[in-house]
Structure formats: structure tokens, C-alpha cells
Image: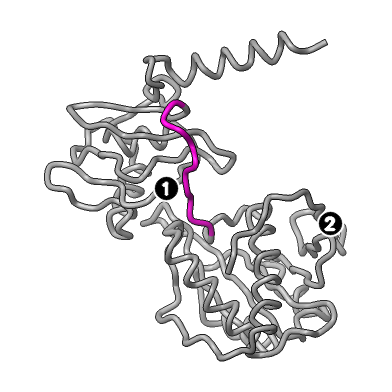
């Protein structure tokens, strides 16, 4: 499946009951699909929607006290109503969910089984969540045209997920030159990173301190454990090595993880010339203000 090209598109979010915290319908321009987003407390309202009677794929999302990563379950249903009803009674971890179906009923059981397999593969590669799925099902055999159609449908879904606050299916890949990178160093170790629209990315090959200072926030300690358990941080003897590019919510969270202590990322991330991220951001803001009419 090829990556989604970066092109402008519009999203329409419809709130049928007038409550922005309630059930929402998500549609994308020039797309045959529709997503239904709801909190667990809104499940009864979701059951009344005609979309839930169709064949589709769904994602359950929740958190836990012992992990910094969201817990995710990916599934499919024909229709999705039966599977979601079962999970409502048997799975306790999830707080909200989203399911996708086609508006023209063009998706069948094999189509959504392929999407389920691909989403599980992408989540395992990205390592941005804890999967509640026990095993990865075997993908069905589809014709070449059907495979192309399903993968195109999935690409549109993937472009919508970040707008829902769900960025667990996309593996970060750096395309920056060394001059654009930032560095954090301590105790002979060096990490590389950069700012991105998704957050702050720490690059593959970065060195991470194994030592944790008493000032390290508890949530960062949990996060470091999650990254070790998911093999994002690989044991390299005296330090951890970042096995693949990984995105953090902020520069400070990234530098805390890397340095093993409390850190202000805007001060500790610096470019090759030794200028801090804070200085670079201030310079950029001043330049932009100077360009204003």
C-alpha cells in the first residue's frame, strides 16, 4: 500500500444531537466512506445510527494507569453493531471508539478483514500504542482491483485519524538534512531530533541514558518503560539506542526521556551551532513579525 500523498482536502463533522462531546459523523471530500465517533457513554446513541448496521472496521481506544501509551483494539464486523455490542459488555479498557463504513454499502466481509489486518500491521510498526488484540488474523485473498479499492479507502481513513486525536498508525520517517536537526547531549551520550507537525521526533540511532535521576517525572518513567517493552529503546550496553524514529508530544518530554532527568526541551535541544530551540523559535517569531504588514 502506497503512502497517502500530501494534498489539500476538507473534512465535514456533523453533530446530530447538537452536543460537540457526543456522537459525531466524519466525512471527507470525494470519499465514499463515513466515520462514526462516539464515547462509551454514547454507545446507546450509536446503536440508533443506520451506519452501525453496515459492514465496517472499528477501533476502540482507552488508557491505563500503568502505561503512558493508549490501549487500542482493532476489529471488523459484518455488521459492526454485533461486534461493538459484544465489546461494550466484555471489554472494559476503552473510553471511546470510531468505526468506518461505506455510504454505498460497497464494503464486504473480505474488504474489512484486509483493512483490519493492515491497521494491525501499521500499529505494530508505529509502536505508538498498546494493542489489546491477541493475534493478527490472516489477510483474505482479494482480486487486484479489490485490493486497490480497499487500500485507497484505508488511505482516506488514515488521513482522518490524526484529526480525531488518534496518531497510532503512522510510523515517523525523517527526511531532514543534518543542518535542520537538533541535538541533546549528556554524560557522553548524544541524541538527535527535530520539530514536526506531529510533535517532537527523536531520530533512530539516538543514544538514551539508562540512568534515571530522582527528578524524573513519574509519567516519563512509565513512558521509558513502555518504549523499552515495545523495543523502541533497544539495549546497547551502557545506554539505550533508539531503534526507530519516535514522536513525542513536546520537546521537553523527548529530552526528559533521552536524558533521564527533568529537562526543559526548549533549552536542551540545540542545533549544530549550539543555539537552543528556544532561541531558534524566538528568531523565527521575530522574523515573521517583521514580515507582517
Image coordinates for residue 97, horizontal then vertical, percent? 63, 68
Q: How many marks?
A: 2
> In the figure, residue 184 lies in which quadrant?
top left
Q: Quadrant of the N terminus?
A: bottom right
The stretch of residues the image draws in magenta is: 170-179
Q: Is residue 129 left or right of residue 1?
A: left
Is tag 1's residue or tag 2's residue first in the polypeptide sequence? 2
Instruction: Decide which of 280, 229 is in the foreground and name it.
Output: 280
Could you give the CA–CA distance between mark 1 and mark 2, rounded to whole angstroms? 30 Å
- Quickly name the residue at label 2: 12
> In the figure, residue 127 lies in which quadrant?
bottom left
- Contact between marks 1 and 2 (CB within 8 A): the answer is no
Magenta residue check for 247:
no
Mark 2 surroundings within 10 Å by alpha-carbon count, few (fewer than 14), some (14 through 19), many (20 or more): few
Q: Residue at x 41, y 36 (%)?
A: 253
Q: Secondary structure at mark 1?
A: strand
Q: Residue at x 30, y 44 (%)?
A: 205
Image coordinates for residue 41, horizontal then vertical, percent? 67, 67
Mark 1 surroundings within 10 Å by alpha-carbon count, few (fewer than 14), some (14 through 19), many (20 or more): many
Residue 265: image tag: none
- Quickly name the residue at label 1: 246
Image coordinates for residue 274, horizontal then vertical, percent? 37, 15
> In the figure, residue 119 lies in which quadrant?
bottom right
The residue positioned farthest toward the left in the image shown:
237
Q: Residue at x 25, y 46 (%)?
A: 241
Q: Main secondary structure of the magenta part?
A: loop
Q: Is residue 165 above or below residue 105?
A: above
Image coordinates for residue 58, horizontal then vertical, percent? 63, 74
Amino acid at each position: 500500500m502506497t503512502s497517502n500523498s500530501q494534498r489539500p482536502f476538507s473534512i465535514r463533522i456533523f453533530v446530530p444531537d447538537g452536543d460537540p462531546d457526543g456522537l459525531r459523523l466524519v466525512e471527507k471530500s470525494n470519499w465514499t466512506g463515513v466515520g462514526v465517533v462516539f464515547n462509551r457513554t454514547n454507545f446507546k446513541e450509536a446503536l440508533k445510527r443506520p451506519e452501525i448496521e453496515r459492514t465496517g472496521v472499528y477501533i476502540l481506544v482507552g488508557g491505563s494507569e500503568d502505561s503512558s501509551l493508549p490501549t487500542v483494539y482493532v476489529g471488523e464486523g459484518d455488521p459492526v453493531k454485533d461486534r461493538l455490542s459484544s465489546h461494550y459488555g466484555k471489554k472494559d479498557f476503552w473510553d471511546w471508539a470510531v468505526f468506518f463504513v461505506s455510504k454505498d454499502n460497497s464494503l464486504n466481509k473480505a474488504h474489512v478483514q484486509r483493512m483490519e489486518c493492515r491497521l494491525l500491521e501499521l500499529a505494530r510498526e508505529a509502536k505508538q500504542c498498546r494493542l489489546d488484540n491477541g493475534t493478527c488474523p490472516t489477510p483474505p485473498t482479494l482480486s487486484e482491483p479489490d485490493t486497490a479499492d480497499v487500500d485507497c479507502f484505508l488511505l482516506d481513513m488514515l488521513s482522518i485519524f490524526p484529526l480525531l486525536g488518534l496518531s497510532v498508525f503512522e510510523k515517523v520517517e525523517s527526511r531532514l538534512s543534518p543542518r535542520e536537526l537538533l541535538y541533546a547531549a549528556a554524560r557522553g551520550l548524544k541524541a538527535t531530533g527535530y520539530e514536526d507537525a506531529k510533535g517532537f521526533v527523536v531520530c533512530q540511532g539516538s543514544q538514551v541514558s539508562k540512568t534515571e535521576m530522582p527528578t524524573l517525572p513519574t509519567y516519563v518513567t512509565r513512558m521509558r518503560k513502555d518504549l523499552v517493552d515495545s523495543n523502541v529503546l533497544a539495549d546497547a550496553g551502557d545506554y539505550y539506542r533508539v531503534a526507530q524514529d519516535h514522536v513525542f508530544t513536546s520537546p521537553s518530554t523527548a529530552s526528559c526521556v533521552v536524558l533521564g532527568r527533568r529537562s526543559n526541551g526548549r533549552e536542551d535541544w540545540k542545533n549544530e551551532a549550539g543555539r537552543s530551540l528556544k532561541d531558534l523559535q524566538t528568531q523565527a517569531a521575530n522574523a515573521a513579525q517583521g514580515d507582517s504588514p
